[in-house]
Image (cartoon, helix red, strand yellow):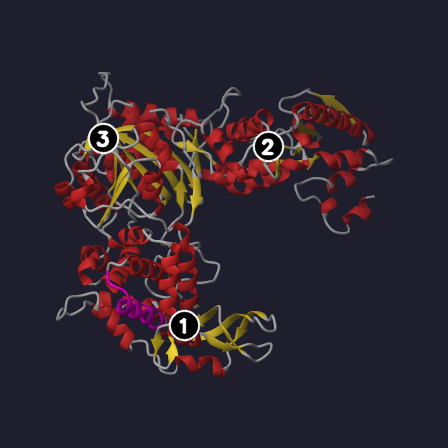
Amino acid sequence: MSLGDRFVPGELQEFIPGDPFWPPSPEGVASSYAKSLSPPGSLVLIPFSLSPLLPLELLDSGYKVIASSFNPLPILSLKALHNRGEDFISALTHLEDAPRGEKLLRHYLQSLYLVECPGCGELVEAEFFLWEGQTPAAKAVKCPKCGTAGTFPLVPTDLKPLENLKEKGPDYWYVLARLFPPGEVSPPEAEELPLVYTPRNLHCLNAIFVKIEALFPEKSPQGLALKTALLGAMHLSLSLYPSPEFRGRPMRLHPPPRFVEANAWKAFQVAAENLRRFFRPLPMVEPEEFFQKDKAPALLPVPWGIKKLEGEIPPASASLLILEPPPLDRAWWALNFLWAGWLMGYQAAYPLRPLALKGVFGWDWYEETLKRSLLKLKGLLKPDGFALFLGQDIPPVMAECLVLAGAKAGLRPESFSFRERDTRLEIRLLFSNPSSEKVWPVVGRREEETVEEAILEVLTYSGEPLTPTLLRLAVEWWLSSRKPWAWGDRKRGEFRSFLEEMLSSLLRENRLKPWAEGELLGLPQYPSLSIPLSDRAELEVYRLLREKGLLTMGELEELFYASFHGPLAPKSDFLRECLASYGEETEGGWRLRAEDEPERRAKDQEEVKAILQELGEKLGFQVKEGARDPFDVIWEEKEASGRPLQLIAGLNFGFVVESTAALTGFFLRHFSPPFPRSYVVIPGGRASLVWYKLKNMPLWSSLKGWQFIKYRHLRRLAQEKAPDRYSLQKIIGLDPVVERPGAQLSFM
């Protein structure tokens, strides 16, 4: 196994663009691990299948794949891709041209969304509606006749399509009846589920479903594909999105005070069009055939839970498990229960009922349930086989549960890396199935000593302070994989309390220090040889652009993350900011900007230092170069001689001349500058990267006393015949006065 503790990024691929219930799949990640861990022709088991694209990637790499889930919807979506584009288009046309009363179905559904164009008065199909409480208040239109586009108030004629639609009309009762066996009284929690749609959207979606049921056999490829497109429309037409720009997954089942009513008919058409990209013949087989085949690629998609898998799959037959962590979110499960019952009937939806209707039971329950599942799955895995968790958008607490559940299930931690995306994580967590128990060396130490060593190792590796959340997660991994540590039956909450006590003890002993007003925890001091992770990441982008020449984004990501080993991987948006700062995009990829060639930057730095010397003398200061750490140039007031030291410092100006923004280590050593007037002089090309760090990195956000000046403004000021100190004030900052409209004239 050669991937080690490095983050494998992959290229995000969307199934239905903008659909939060089918998150983007990191194309290339699973196949990279599979090729490194097991030969083609091996069996790969995906027991919590979520993305229909993941099994396809493994098939293309030559593996036999079982994709399973007790949620039937991912399996429906995967089976739907076994199709031909021309057959699907024919089926879609057949559906759209089916009769609905006196109209074709497409004409009838379009009529539900017709509104008056505020420009020409013609009837046009609305893009969406905005609701205030229980009432539609505005419409969004793009008129194909007069070009009027925007959001406008409704007029009385726009409400006509709603006249015969009730909140709990026939469509509501039809959908609710599909969730439960005949004669069973639906519980109150279920009766709220169809209300996640407006009456119009519920009517539209149900009209499409009823017609699919009438026209296509239950298991026909075309019927499955149309239902999958309808599922995408169901995702996009919920009344749970507060604005058209909102792209997150809804966390509640009740519409917000202001919400978007999508055009469900258009959403169905968009989903159908996007689905066509993935149609192709798939080597799907029935269970009895799957294990009789040779090592040729084959796909077995089955709606099985872990218990069923354990009974149907031969023990020790899978070389690799790939696990997509299922969400711990009642709204997610309740909606999947609704969609599964609606599209496939109450029997298919039955396994989802406990999570959908009884609520979610908390993270300790999640960890324990996952551990029990892994204990069973471990029996299906070959000795020395591997289990890989791939998570694209998970909370840190879920990552904790994955680490602990795997270790407690007797799997051996092999590698772990993650990177932050806002407050969520993308993770790559690999375990092996040991053929023998791992024997740790006997060290004769207390638990406190082991945890203390893990904390200090993590902080030394990062080279900079961390948030308590990331520190805890990294420490748990270090303990699981690198330390003589046995989790036993210790619960996650118990260990968290124990770790908090250890951190508090180290803080009291001054062996740790709170940074950024308590947002971060780190070492009390960072030596000059210690390079923080964020600085290493920036300099690595610079090195790659400098040494490798032209690189595509994919090539650059692969090389970049190969240089970082350990659980803490640099963020993807940080990588992009560094790339934008040092590189320029061309038709073939990215290359280093000419002005950032090392020789040119070294020359620029010397030139700027010389300018500071000359300018300081012009402004009447006594100039000293390199006279005091950390400054390259100091301006002293000539009349400061003989004054107390604290007064002299208040009169001085200190300048540090840099060519990069890799300054985290510098600021850790010089968090509070010696002079109130302390400046870091940077190239203009670094300004956006500095802005990013000031906004997104708590250590930088908490800086006090340091200000920034751009090279070009110093050069311009030095060219003036009679510069004064007021002119100097105008060039200070990333957004200095001199760059604002109208300022150039007064400056000159």
Decide: few, some or many residues near mark 1? Use Cα within 10 Å; few <14, some 14-19, many ≥20.
Answer: some
Magenta-colored segment: predominant secondary structure: helix
- Where 2 falls versus 367 (above or below)? above
Q: Which residues are magenta?
A: 203-218
First of labels 1, 2 by sequence position? 1
The residue furthest right is 721
Whole-angstrom CA distance, mark 1 to mark 3, is 54 Å
| Residue named by callout 1 | 106
For the point 15% across and 66% down, the residue is 181
Check contact, mark 1 vs mark 2: CB within 8 A.
Answer: no
Q: Position of residue 282 (x, y in %)?
A: 31, 46
Please identify the quarter of the rendering in which residue 489 is found.
top left
Asked if the residue under mark 3 is in contact with the one under mark 1, i.e. CB atoms within 8 Å, the reply is: no
The answer to whether residue 666 is left or right of residue 487 is: right
The residue tagged with tag 3: helix, strand or loop? loop
Nearer the observer, disc 2 or disc 3?
3
Q: Nearer the viewer, mark 1 or mark 2?
A: 1
Could you tell me the amino acid type at mark 1? Arg
Q: Which residue is mark 3?
A: 411
Residue position for label 2: 661
Instruction: Indicate left or right for 503 with 262 as reference.
Output: left
Residue drawn at (48%, 29%), measured in percent from left and top?
Answer: 559
In the rendered image, which quarter is residue 718 located in?
top right
Residue type of the residue flagged with mark 2:
Ala
Horizontal and vertical percent position of residue 39: 30, 28
